[in-house]
Image (cartoon, rainbow, N blue to C red):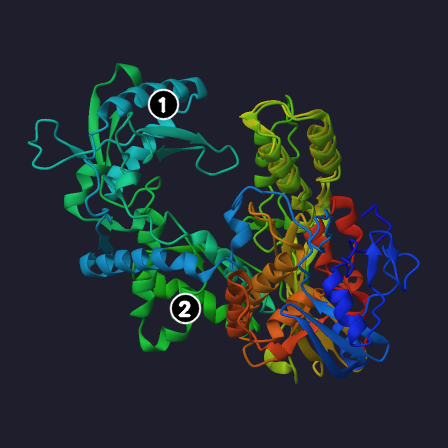
Amino acid sequence: MDQNKICTSLPKLKDPKNIEELKQLGIFASDICLNENLCLYENDPKEIHILLGADTAARLFTGEIKNLSPDLIAMNTKLGWTVIGRSRITENDSSSTLMSLLVNDVNISDLWRLDTLNINDPAENQSRKELEEAAKEHFERSVKRDNEGRYIVSLPWIHDHPPLPDGRKIAERRLNSCIKALERAEKLVDYDDVFQDWQKEGIIEEVDPMQEIKQGQHFLPLHPVFKENSTTKVRPVFDGSAKERNTPSINDCLEKGPNLVELIPSLMNRFRVGKYGVIADIKKAFLQIGLQERDRPYLRFLWKDRGREGNIKILQHKRVVFGISSSPFLLGATLELHLKNAPDHLKETAQQLMRSFYVDNCVFSVNTKKELARFISESQALLSTAKFDLRGWEHSPTEDKIEERQEDRKVPVLGLLWNLPKDTMSLDMKGLMKEDKGPTTKRKILSTVHRIFDPIGFSCPVTLEPKCLLQECWKLGLSWDAELPLLITERFERWKMKLPKLNVLEIPRCVREDFAEYSKLSIHVFCDARFSCPVTLEPKCLLQECWKLGLSWDAELPLLITERFERWKMKLPKLNALQIPRCVREDFAEDSKLSIHVFCDASQSAYATCIFLRAESADNTSCQLIQARNRVAPLKKISIPRLELLSCTIGARLAKATISELGLEKIPIFYWSDSMNALYWIKRNENWATFVYNRVLEIRKLTNPEDWRHISGTLNPADLPSRGSNAEELVKSLWWEGPNWLRRP
């Protein structure tokens, strides 16, 4: 780079035999040299005066050729004769070659599974889906229904699982600890009342200790959970993951079923489509599903009626238990089976409910007050026949109830906060407001970022910075609990200082009221982030830096990493002000032409994608961010063009999932990238290298290559999450409504 030349010196024609041949043919070449520093027709034989491209050189050839030797030919050009080929006299010459190749640093692989929702490689899911289908088949073969309409299920045991011990010793130790905690909190009577009520309701039953055990048994340890802000101040929780050394837990022996977290982006998309958002939950959902008798002995637990002085008695569950890894799967499979068998007059509502549940939470949206009333009444009637009580209804305020808008009230929805009067969405920043004492470590950075739950992705430009810091820690070989270098600590602290800015961020809940009202729809995808992913990128990068440093989880981090983390964290409270409309757009004019735009971008730190919905009418043009994702650059060093191609790949995946969830398959969609390399690969169906070929093949299957367009890097909104942003910058940015050019008529 610092040399004042563009290539090494070229060898001159020195072979006397070749020179004599040229003389006999009457050819005089400028590169004939008598020695290293003297040529017949050049003053400076080491200097290259001009470089000609192959396209230009071809125009200079006259076609006249003379063969000199087996390895050389003389070719006539409009500028004179030149010699081409290999000389018998060789010389050694060292040189440096500059290639236009940028590589990235290593990262932590799959730091957050949430980052990969709807953008992960479909091949990764294939084997898992096969296991899930097998679990569903077993469920459907074994499920029954009693005379009251309650479903009775069996536990989905893993085939050939290791022997499950009874776990009584652990259960006894935990029982004593549990009773002490309850006595200190003066909640022992309340805790015992729960078990008394469960026995009356047939949820649990007492077991005769003298009864012969015809099969295995297993005891679940229990502990209390205190919730002062709830109607139930204390409740029992059972630990299905407890185990002795070198023995499995009951959760190790059960199929877990599908990863339900993957449903959240789809549920959130459907929640933001209709004019009226609506949520509810099933009261004590797990406890409404019966358990077959042969499985009950494996869900036993110990209890004392009168605290430490009472006799130990054995109880066992007759219903599905909260704390067992397969319980969410059993609930979901039961709901799906029940809704599939819905009566004809409730089929439409049943189909809506099948796409609305995350465990026991119902999340949906509708377009009219009539649909809202019907959805609520029919849902309750449909689920009540299976002993499910769908209650706790909340919905967007209706026009005829203006008083509903007077109270500023927020309710949780899939990890976000829904401001009901404003009908906006925001991040739940309570966990981030707690002051973390002690040195800055990799574990501290990871813990901080994990507290930003953002399934939509609007904060991903902010969270990029700590992810990059983690990468730096990884490079340095820092352990999880080692104190980070000062530089990394300072970066983290600067990032953290601005997090409170996210408190002011709100996005509309509703994307728009009714797609059917608009004459034209299109989609634009910008590859680079989730809503808050510009903010969350910084701690992810910090984690990678810790990894590079080889720091342990609890080691204090270097000052540099600590300061970066603290700066990032200080600004996190800004996210408290972040609110997004629950409905993506509810104020589009009826004559609006809608389009969707997908933007893609990458940097050395990360690659990402973001999707905008654009509405153009006679009077106005507006945009709204729908969804976004970003990922820290992978462990393996990859060139920037290939990272850009990865951003296009996740853009195609996220767009496909979003379009399918919102029912927008027939509308036009536009994909944007500022990488000419990536666009060249996508538009040309050629036999590229394996890495490029596989991703281009997938992109061309998911999208039309003609829909891909080039955009300047300075105009690409996906640039923000790929490079990261602090909370304060994100609040003030145009991240929420897209770039200016997209909002022009």
Drawn side of residue 281 relative to residue 630, left or right: left
The answer to which image quadrant residue 390 occupies is bottom left
- The three-letter amino acid code for the residue at tag 1 is Cys
Instruction: State the image quarter where residue 560 is shown.
Output: top right
The quadrant in which residue 715 appears is bottom right
The reply to whether residue 702 is in sight is yes
Which is in the foreground here, disc 1 or disc 2? 1
Q: Which residue is pictured at 23% across the width and 46% down the height? A: 157
Q: Is residue 586 or residue 689 the one in the foreground?
A: 689
In front: 64, or 680? 64
- Residue 23 image position (x, y, % from top left): 81, 71
Which of the labelled discs sits on residue 442, or is there none? Answer: none
Q: CA distance from mark 1 to mark 2?
A: 42 Å
Which residue does the numbered mark 1 point to in the structure image?
178
Which of 241 and 173 lies nearest the eye of the viewer? 241
Residue 334 at x, y percent in the picture: 30, 58
Q: Is residue 582 visible?
A: no
- Residue farthest right in this picture: 43
Judge from the rendering whether residue 209 lies leftward or rightward of residue 279; answer left or right: left
Which residue is depicted at the point 40% across and 58% down? 125
x%, y% of residue 185?
Answer: 45, 21
Q: Is 654 left, or right, of 12 in this rendering? A: left
**Chain-order first, disc 1 or disc 2:** 1
Q: Residues within 10 Å of mark 1 (few under 14, many from 20)?
A: some
Q: Find numbered disc 1 in the image and state the secondary structure of the residue it sits on.
A: helix
Give x and y (percent) for residue 239: 34, 33
Q: Amino acid at mark 2?
A: Glu
**The C terminus, quarter of image:** bottom right
Secondary structure state at the residue bearing disc 2: helix
Q: Residue at coordinates 44% horizontally, 65% vertically from top-left? A: 355
Give residue 378's mark. Answer: 2
In the picture, measured across the screen, residue 571 lies left or right of residue 340, that is right
